[in-house]
Amino acid sequence: MKGRPGPLLVRGTLVDAPHDPFTTGAPLRVEDDGGLLVVDGRIADRGAIADVRRRARDAGTAATELDLRGGLVVPGFVDTHVHLPQVRVIGGLGLSLLDWLTDWALPEEARLAEPSYAAGVATDFVHGLVEAGTTTALVFGSHFAPAVDLLLQEAERVGLRTTAGLVVADRVLRPELLTTPERAHAESVDLSSRWHDRGLARYAVTPRFSLSSSPELLDACADVLRDVPGTLMTSHVNENPREIEQVAAAFPQARDYVDTYDRAGLLGPGTVLAHDVHPTDAGLAAMAAAGSAVAHCPTSNAALGSGLFPLRPHVEHGVRVALGSDVGGGTGFSLLKEALQAQFTQSLLGPDGLPLEPAHLLWLATRAGALALGLGDETGDLSVGRSFDAVHLRPRAGTTTATVVEHAPDAVAAWRALVALGTTSDVAGVWVRGRRLDGDDDVRHDHLGDDSGQDDEARRARRPVG
Ligand SMILES: [Zn+2]
């Protein structure tokens, strides 16, 4: 990583969701002509631009002004469930989970045994996240330890805040993806000892799902959690009825799917389980008691026909929920699209659904994920004290999205329009700890193409203040 830039004075329309709208009813927080003073990558002051600029000047802080007016400045997106080895096979539509895994995803995952192939996938994957405005991700790594190393190296080089781990399985999957409890433990401890809490990287113990895990493998995973303090745990749960039946048959002693993890000691405040489309009350109660979180991946649930996510009982039980893209079961890296699909899903549930307002959608895509990953002090909103992890959403001139955003009566309506219409091409800038990820040589950005004029304009807009 390069060194940190000097103090920045960021000017723009600031929109974030610092308080849980599900429990507090809090609306979005908006600063229309707002300013953020960023020192050493961290937000040191915020408010109206004139006030922040004056306070910086009075304190003798020489800050470079970064003019992000036009569009919105929102916290960087937090993707709580995304698979490294599936970036090149996004789009396997029309299959249900177990067939999709066997016929579509796992053959590609096996290719990551070859380090040169895995290196290319890691580059594509990190690039895809940054292009979508994701600044923090909980990543399902690979079944091959060298591929996990390559991912974390690439994330470190680019500056993406990444938690990832070795995916382990010892049954059901194709043979080259299987390990043993002993080897899983040794490789996981080795990776986590080198990567956990190194810069922006952290480690997550990652059994693929109970269906492909013996009880002994789950025990080995719990040993890693104990041996390397602070590591997270992530897996899948209650995604598909056929999967759930097979898990019940494989774990006859378990009360339900959640219990297969709980009885192994894998349920805690650092646990993030993807999907939970078909929960049980007992499972929800267990997750709430443990402080575990659910990664809700709505485009994946639709693409694989998994079902409509019952958000209401999760909220009523006090289970934390955040968004994940579930690439490549999901349909891309954009959490704008996931937010839209989450809104659709609740609408389609009719009276059982939980209507989602703009504040819920931004919360689910940002702050909720930061809290689920234990990064609440660090990221997820634009409060003083947080890292400046942010996205500038500015549609290209001449697009329908630009038209709707320009005519939006206020910033909340603009955010609503960006959820409905926005794509990765509306991401005009991405920062983590005050450092731009997408606009320099650290990330391939040939995709910017006709955006390059915007970038030059943004660079020209940097000028000293005071
Ligand atoms: Zn998944």
Image (spheres, rainbow, N blue to C red):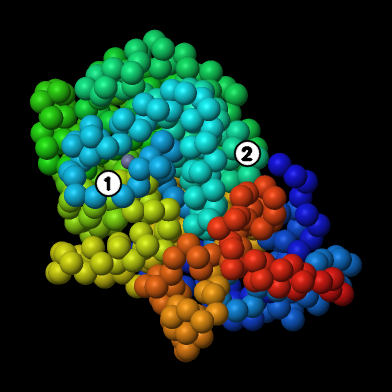
Residue 363 found in image quarter: bottom left
Residue 355 screen position, x and y as percent: 26, 70
Q: Residue at x 19, y 36 (%)?
A: 98
Q: Residue 460: x and y, percent? A: 77, 71
Q: Residue 268 in the image: state x and y as whole percent.
A: 37, 35
Sequence-wise first label, 2 or 1: 1
> What's the amino acid at mark 2?
Glu
Q: Residues within 10 Å of mark 2 (few under 14, many from 20)?
A: some
Work out whether 290 lies above or below 13: above
Query: Which callout, 2 or 1, points to the residue nearer the camera?
Result: 1
Could you say which quadrant of the image residue 285 lies in?
top left
Q: CA distance from mark 2 to mark 1?
A: 30 Å
4 sits to left or right of 337: right
Q: Is residue 423 above or below residue 141?
A: below
- As helix, strand or loop, the secondary structure at mark 2 comes to helix
Please say if the residues under marks 2 and 1 sit with CB atoms less than 8 Å apart: no
Residue type (three-letter) at the residue carrying disc 1: Gly
Q: Quadrant of ligand 1?
A: top left
SS of the residue under disc 1: loop
Mark 1 sits on what residue? 92
Res. 359 visible in picture: no
Distance from mark 1 CB to nearest ligand 1 atom below 8 Å = no
Residue annotated with mark 2? 156
